């Protein structure tokens, strides 16, 4: 690499919770640059979570996010003509990125009327240790466990 790595732009905290993590989450929900709609979806989903569980929706969302955060993943590495899946620790920023992406993706794949409803249901499921996003984390960990024999190769 010749040039210096691109600088990360500082994120502005969201208006309601003053949390930069919420802004990151909303940026992942956003399509075609429509951030106000993405905020509306997120806040509506948090309100729905609060109504359904009678607890703080924001806290449940944080718990859901931590429940789907992976600790290890497998990375492909070619060694002598064969490709091995080598387990590796996940960097801190990538952990957050993966968990956000999985929550948003699997919420979108759920069946429901609005994205807010689907996201609320996925958040509730993930906070209980259920749902597709949580299953994805479990599968990732299972893959790493199954390929533990190749961990000496390192990535």
Image (cartoon, rainbow, N blue to C red):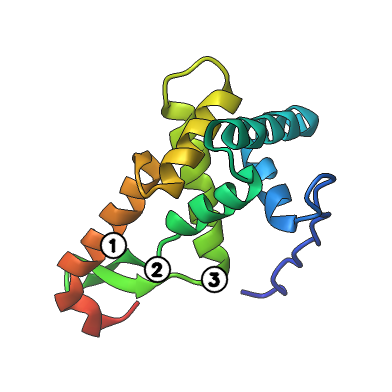
Residue 75, image x and y in percent?
33, 65
Q: Are the two marked residues, 1 and 2, in contact with CB atoms closer than 8 angstroms?
A: yes
Position of the N terminus by quadrant? bottom right
The first of marks 3 and 1 along the sequence is: 3
Horizontal relation, residue 45 to residue 82: left or right: right
Report, in whole angstroms, how far the alpha carbon at label 3 lies from the one at label 1. 16 Å
Report, in whole angstroms, how far the alpha carbon at label 2 lies from the one at label 3. 9 Å
Image height check: is 142 above or below 41? below
Residue 50, image x and y in percent?
61, 37
- How would you rate the neighbour count of disc 1 (Cα within 10 Å): few for under 14, some for 14-19, many for 20 or more? some
Image height check: is 117 above or below 99? above
Residue on which disc 3 sits: 92
Residue on which disc 2 sits: 71
For mark 1, give the secondary structure.
helix
User: Which residue shows up at 80% across the image and 48% down it?
Assistant: 14
Residue on which disc 1 sits: 141
User: Which residue shows up at 22% across the image and 60% down it?
Assistant: 142
User: Which residue shows up at 58% across the image and 66% down it?
Assistant: 93
User: Which residue shows up at 55% across the image and 60% down it?
Assistant: 96
Report, in whole angstroms, how far the alpha carbon at label 1 lies from the one at label 2. 8 Å
The first of marks 2 and 3 along the sequence is: 2
Note whether residue 31 is visible: no
Horizontal relation, residue 18 to residue 151: left or right: right
For mark 2, give the secondary structure.
loop
For mark 3, give the secondary structure.
helix
Label total for image:
3
Position of the C terminus by quadrant? bottom left
- How would you rate the neighbour count of disc 2 (Cα within 10 Å): few for under 14, some for 14-19, many for 20 or more? some
């Amino acid at each position: 690499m010749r040039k210096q790595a691109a600088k990360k732009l500082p994120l502005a905290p969201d208006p309601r919770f003053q949390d930069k993590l919420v802004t990151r989450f909303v940026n992942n929900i956003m399509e075609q640059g429509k951030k106000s709609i993405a905020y509306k979806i997120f806040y509506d989903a948090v309100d729905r979570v609060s109504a359904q569980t009678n607890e703080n929706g924001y806290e449940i969302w944080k718990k859901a996010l931590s429940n789907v955060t992976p600790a290890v993943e497998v990375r492909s590495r070619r060694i002598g003509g064969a490709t091995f899946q080598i387990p590796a620790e996940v960097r801190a920023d990538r952990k957050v990125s993966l968990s956000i992406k999985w929550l948003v993706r699997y919420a979108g794949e759920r069946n429901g009327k609005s994205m807010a409803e689907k996201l609320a249901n996925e958040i509730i499921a993930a906070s209980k240790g259920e749902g597709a996003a949580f299953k994805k984390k479990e599968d990732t960990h299972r893959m790493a466990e199954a390929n533990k024999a190749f961990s000496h190769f390192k990535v």
